[in-house]
Amino acid sequence: MTDDISKYYYDNSVGKQYQKENDIYLMREINKFHQKSVFIGPKYNQKKHLNPLLESYLFEIEKKIPKIEIYEESIALDDTVIDNKGSLRHFNADLNFQEVSSVLNHSFGIDKENLHRRFPSAGGLYPVYPIFIQLQNNEYDSRLSRGYYYFDSIQNRLLKLGSLDNQVHGKTVEFALGADEQPMSHQLIVYVGDIEKVVSKYHYVGYKHLFIETGMMAQSLREALSSIPAAGDLSVSGFRHNLLAKHLNLSLSTNLIAMIQWIGKEV
């Protein structure tokens, strides 16, 4: 890369100069609301902990759509072959280095001509960034050792931020990810939202934008994985948010974790 790469990175000191007391208050309020969703133990999200009436209701509505009984006209559309692939719940092999590189670029890569991604973002703020985690040394390439990485899509590189070997409050990162026993896979993406970025422009609506964007990023990742034989993903909200944030050295005052997405193969 021969051009001036500094133009692709934002100067956070500008934000600190702008920051108003009102923005700080909004971030605190958003964090208070967000914290209400993060203290449920992942194991209690399982169906075996539901009461029978609720379980029967969920059984009735899962994977179904509303049936509209009153309408003005019914117009049949052309037949289309639909072959959707669902989530992958059993992983037994890693993506290799080349596959990780391809998936990250096709999911979250930036066109340096116009700074566009594969997904839109309100106001062009792009407040969500992906952290790639490798829980065990990659079986195919020693460059992907245990740790967590920031994907720098401008210089097309992974920046290792830590090894994840230390415990936090006596708990491993696997426990923080909701894995009371074995983790789903050795690889995953953690979607980190920058509250400060969206609050200054969109206030409370910015919180909603974080999750809308996370969903589009996760879909981009799923589509990129579809080109790799036997690869798949599983999106999960049942993780120990605050503990995971501490393992990743995130500030809970300015960051939140919107979702994690396990990736890998079943061969």
Image: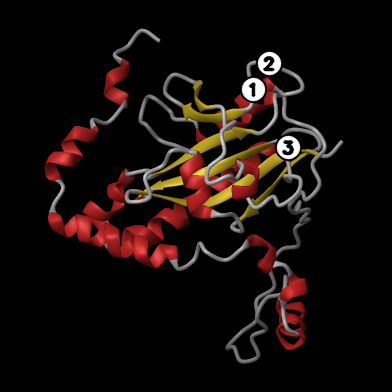
Residue at position x 63%, y 55% in the image: 236
Q: Quadrant of the C terminus?
A: top right
Q: Position of residue 258 (x, y in %)?
A: 49, 53
Q: Earlier in the sequence, mark 1 or mark 3?
A: 1
Q: Residues within 10 Å of mark 2 (few under 14, many from 20)?
A: few
Would you say 57 lies left or right of 20 here? right
What residue would you read off at disc 3?
Answer: 264
Q: Quadrant for residue 53, please give it.
A: bottom right
Identify the residue at image location x=77%, y=84%.
56
Q: CA distance from mark 1 to mark 3?
A: 15 Å
Tell me, for residue 168, which label it has, or none. Answer: none
Q: Residues within 10 Å of mark 3 (few under 14, many from 20)?
A: many
> Pointer 2: what residue?
142
Nearest-to-viewer mark from 1 and 3:
1
Above or below, 104 relative to 63: above
Above or below residue 256? Residue 78 is: below
Mark sitting on residue 145: 1
What amino acid is at disc 1?
A: Ser
Q: Label 2 sits on what residue type?
A: Ser
Q: Are marks 1 and 2 in contact (CB under 8 Å)?
A: yes
* Secondary structure at numbered mark 3: strand
Horizontal and vertical percent position of residue 242: 48, 52
Residue placed most toward the observer, 102 or 162: 162
Q: Which amino acid, by three-letter code, is at mark 3?
A: Gly
* Percent x, y of residue 184: 74, 46
Cα separation, mark 1 vs mark 2, equals 6 Å
Can the viewer see residue 120? no
Q: Secondary structure at mark 1?
A: loop
